[in-house]
Amino acid sequence: MKKNLFIILSMFMALTMLSCAREGCTDHDADNYDPAAKKNDYSCQYTGYHIIWYGYEVSNFFKSHNVTYLHITTSNGQRLTHRAADYAFGPNKYDSGCIVLKQTMGTKHMGTDYVIITTNLGDEVWSGYIEYGVGKPKSTELILR
């Protein structure tokens, strides 16, 4: 009888300890990662990034055409201004630049967006779909039309 009682109590304690596993976000790439969480409760929240970069040929084009700003508009409502002059007029003839776009994606692990880039002179220099990366940003080269 004592043996059965000991087994029942042991099983009860083991089940109690297992059910006390702390729930939370267990994904290292999530904004709200909880290192103390032992069980994923699917509450992870993500921010994705995309980098649009351009090389010195594009920088030199901006410089020769008096492009000082780029205006970036995304289909999700972001409106950004990028100082192209910071790169086009840099001290090194091989200066390049990059535009970092950030998107809060909630519980989704990836997202897409449509981006339009125009100059301060009103000329559209690039447009297209981009994909946001979580953990490791996605990237696109800005190639002038």
Image (spheres, rainbow, N blue to C red):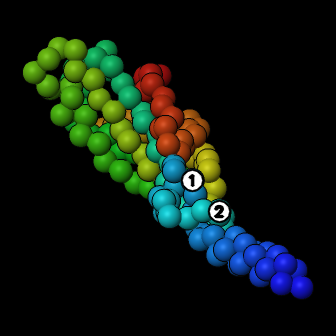
Q: In the visual, does 111 lie left or right of 68?
A: right
Disc 1 designates what residue? 27
Q: Are marks 1 and 2 in contact (CB under 8 Å)?
A: yes
The residue that appears at 48% across and 59% down in the rendered structure is 35
Residue 19: tell me if it is visible: no
Of marks 1 and 2, which one's residue comes earlier in the chain?
1
The kind of residue on which mark 1 rests is Asp
Q: What residue occupies the far front of the structure in this picture? A: 2
**What residue sits 31% from the left and 47% below the top?**
81
What element does badge 2 sit on? Answer: strand
Residue 131 drawn at (x, y percent): 57, 40
Of 10 and 6, the residue lying toward us: 6
Residue lying farthest to the left in this orientation: 91
Image quarter where the N terminus lies is bottom right
**Residue on which disc 2 sits:** 40
Q: Is residue 65 left or right of residue 102?
A: left
Closer to the camera, 141 or 17?
17
Callout 2 amino acid: Asn
Q: Is residue 14 left or right of residue 47?
A: right
